[in-house]
Image (cartoon, rainbow, N blue to C red):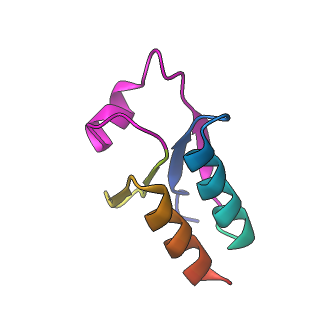
Amino acid sequence: MSPLPVLYSFRRCPYAIRARLALAIGGVSVTIREVDLKAKPEQMLRLSPKGTVPVLAWPDGRVMDESLDIMLWALEQND
């Protein structure tokens, strides 16, 4: 079994909320890492230097850091 993609998220961010909803509707399994926006994880900042959520990172190094891109990708998987 391959590792799941990681979604860096913040529970009250509307962009992260819509990305999480699209992933759920698309049936995409991810590991969610809640981010404290006052102390952003260094690993997330290396993946996306702009420091905003959501950020979706795959084990192979691919990264999406725009909620609309994440939504469209997730819904393409199983809509």
Question: In this rendering, would 63 be left or right of 8?
Answer: left
Tell me which residue sits at (44%, 16%) in the image: 39
Q: Main secondary structure of the magenta part?
A: loop
Residue span colored magenta:
29-53
Residue 42 lies within the magenta run: yes
Q: Is residue 62 above or below residue 76?
A: above
Q: Would you identify the image quadrant in which residue 1 lies?
A: bottom right
Is residue 14 or residue 47 the one in the foreground? 14
Q: Residue at 47% across / 15% down in the picture?
A: 38
**Picture coordinates of residue 62 (x, y %)?**
33, 61
- Describe residue 23's horizontal placement relative to residue 48 as left or right: right
The residue at the point 68 percent across, 84 percent down is: 79
Residue 17 lies, in percent from the top left, at: 65, 48
Q: Is residue 29 above or below residue 31?
A: below
Residue lying at the far top in this picture: please name it: 38
Name which residue lies at 31% across and 57% down. 61
Q: Quadrant of residue 58?
A: bottom left
Q: Hey, which quadrant is residue 14 in on the image?
A: top right
Residue 30 on image: x %, y %: 61, 55
How many numbered marks does the figure carry?
Answer: 0
Front residue (pair 60, 9): 9
